[in-house]
Image (cartoon, helix red, strand yellow):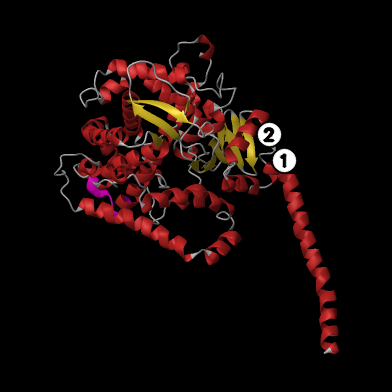
Amino acid sequence: MMDVLATATDGLRTWAPSWARLLFLILTAFILRTIYSITLGPLSRYPGPWYARSSDMVYRFLTASGNLLPWLQAQHDKYGPVVRVGPDRLSYIDPQAWKDIYTARGPKANPKDPGMYTEMDISGHPSILTEPSDTEHARVRHIFSHAFSPKALKAQEPLFTKYVDQLVHNISTSSSSIFDAVRLYNFTTFDIMADLTFGESLGMLQTSKYTTWVSNIFSSLRLLALSTLWRESPLLNSIYTALEPPFVHRESTAHHQHSVDRVNRRLQQPVDRPDGNVDIWTRVLSQPDGRGLTPEQMHSNAAIFMMAGTETTATLLSGVTYHLLRNPDKLGRLAEEIRGAFPSDTKENFTLEALQKLKYLSAVLNEGLRLYPPVPSPLWRVAPREGNEICGDYVPEGTRVAVTAYAASRSDVNFRDAEEFVPERWLGEEDKYASDKREVVQPFSVGARNCLGQSLAWHEMRLILAKVVWNFDMELVEGSERWDEQKCFVLWSKGPLLVKMVPRLEGAVTAGTAA
């Protein structure tokens, strides 16, 4: 036994120095690489905190913890309009960056960062959001554009009105006057988009409850943010894959199958719906090129529509409602405009064309999109072969670049009173806001891959907010005064927004803290 221990000890003495030397070499290589990245690398001339320039783990941990946005804002406040926030990441808040990053075409195009977007393809088949090929993306986008055209939107107007009227009815007939506005808006936008995408509602306005499928959408966002910790590391990704709890894959599969089943059920029905309503497939499949979609493309894009056309719209409406209630003078002016424009709450009054004419309503929504962008996180692109020029400076190949909407909108460089809710800045009424760089607010992105459904979203936002403000006097309930202090896991992690809503009274509109 003693001989065995002695042999083992001798072996350890022989092995330890080699192990120590290997560790020393690895540590030395890491230090030299870090020094090179900070001082001599191709991005070394871009400003940023040294600890972020040396390792991408800083960015990943901040994303996973939900604390990325205030950190990015602080870095831009300190370092300026372009900041190096990772070894290969540049964040911008200059309006010109939107054009340089997202509208470039051909060999100068900056493709989407696959590390960010491939995680969104639950089915394994790319959607219009994640399709890497510009040619295929353009083909699929053209097919779906039939469903989001001005003509289609006008035909879909009765469907929108039906669900918004249901929202108003639910509030009016409730035994309580206290509501969570976040839930109300989510119920409405998900029911609308489900009818447009699946040909049937999810029934959440009827039950006042989230379906399991919708709840899983919200929970998946946190997992998507958390996955930034490992998804770009082959070793960590392999470890996670090996240890991934079975329920994660099971729920992901069930979520996708839910979309597949509902889309298939809609496709088995006539293109022209018996109820007379017009949905996405009514418009798409009635066109000759609509049959060019594969079943997989129909399924994957339906799933994306159910995310992109729901949560983001409800988020914007929640944020706007909060800021209106925190600024009673703005709410009063909006109510005066809406109630003065429409003598009664009828579909003949609240039309697409009539709502577009309400200038202060549009200004309120634009200011909400600025101060509380529904998609606040950077949408990363990658500089192409031979690099690119962004905001007048060369960016080498492989560099990840993005506009950080949250930081851009709250920068004193871009806006006066940047942290204040001031819809008037969009109307040109006050000279002190004339120098605001309003073009930096691009909530639907720009270029060939901007949001296909932005016209639909604008009508939905105008209609829902206008109907709520026309019908109800509102107050912010005590406890929701700091509702906007939120973490962000890809999208905002919103708590309840408690609002007192009572049928409108003739006279002043009030906002503040309800008793």
Query: Where is residue 335, by image quadrant?
Result: top left
| Secondary structure mainly formed by the magenta segment | helix
Give SS at disc 2: loop
Q: Judge whether residue 442 can be spotted in this image.
A: no
Reading the image, the residue beneath label 1 is: 50
Residue 245 painted magenta:
no
Reading the image, the residue beneath label 2 is: 47
Q: How many marks?
A: 2
Query: Where is residue 175, by image quadrant?
Result: top left
Please give the label number shown on residue 105.
none
418 left or right, relative to 373: right
Q: Residue at x 32, y 51 (%)?
A: 297
Q: Judge whether residue 137 can be spotted in this image.
A: yes
- CA gap, disc 1 and disc 2: 9 Å
Q: Nearer the viewer, residue 53 or 226?
A: 226
**How far from the left and from the top, in percent, is residue 50?**
72, 40
Q: Quadrant of the N terminus?
A: bottom right
Query: Over which residues does the magenta segment extend?
Result: 290-297
Q: Residue at x 40, y 16 (%)?
A: 333
**Above or below for 61 versus 84:** below
**Above or below for 393 versus 17:** above
3 left or right, relative to 209: right
11 left or right, relative to 217: right
Q: Amino acid at mark 2?
A: Pro
Specify few, some or many for label 2: CA neighbours under 10 Å numbering under 14, 14-19, or 20 or more: many
Residue 295 painted magenta:
yes
**How far from the left and from the top, in percent, is residue 449?**
41, 38
**How far from the left and from the top, in percent, is residue 409?**
53, 27
Q: Amino acid at mark 1?
A: Trp
**How far from the left and from the top, in percent, is residue 177?**
37, 33
Give SS at disc 1: helix
Q: Nearer the viewer, residue 114 or 179?
A: 179
